[in-house]
Amino acid sequence: MIYDAFKAVAEQTGASKIMHFKQPKLFIMWDTDIGRMHGLGSSAHDYIEFHKRMKLEFGHLEWSRQDRTFMKAIDEYTICERTT
């Protein structure tokens, strides 16, 4: 899996950032704290599970803003969520 290949070089956060920057409309950035908030580890399986959960939580929304991708907005939401 591509996540595992990037994680071996750039660790968990770096792997998701690389994937996000290559495909910003597809991949959400995440880190250890976000994974823990959702009861997940740092494996590729956990990252996929995180995406599934985000799709369940936000998949019904339509996104039309041009200043950031929907995936970036979800990332920003998860950052705010863990600081409150």
Image: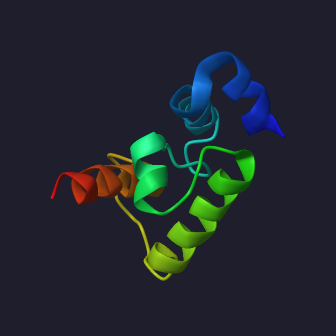
> Residue 22: x, y in percent?
63, 32
Q: Which residue lies at the image location 49% right of the left edge and 43% below the top edge?
A: 29
**Split into 4 quadrants, where in the image is the C terminus?**
bottom left
Residue 19, x across and y down, in percent? 63, 35
Kindly identify the residue that appears in the image at 69 percent across and 45 percent down.
43
Looking at the rendered image, the quarter that the N terminus falls into is top right
Q: Quadrant of residue 78?
A: bottom left
Q: Nearer the viewer, residue 20 or 39?
A: 39
Reply above or below: 64 against 57: above
Image position of 13 with respect to 9: above or below: below
- Position of 79 relative to 38 (above/below): above
Q: Quadrant of residue 2?
A: top right
Q: Residue furthest bottom?
A: 60
In the foreground, 33 or 17: 33
Q: Is residue 80 left or right of residue 14?
A: left
Residue 73 location, x and y as percent? 36, 54
Q: Is residue 69 visible?
A: no
From the viewer's perspective, tell me whether residue 22 is left or right of residue 67: right
* 54 over 26 or under it: above or below: below
Front residue of this view, candidates 65 and 60: 60
Side of 18 where 60 appears, left or right:
left
Which residue is found at the position 56% from the left and 57% from the top?
A: 40
Q: Quadrant of residue 61?
A: bottom left
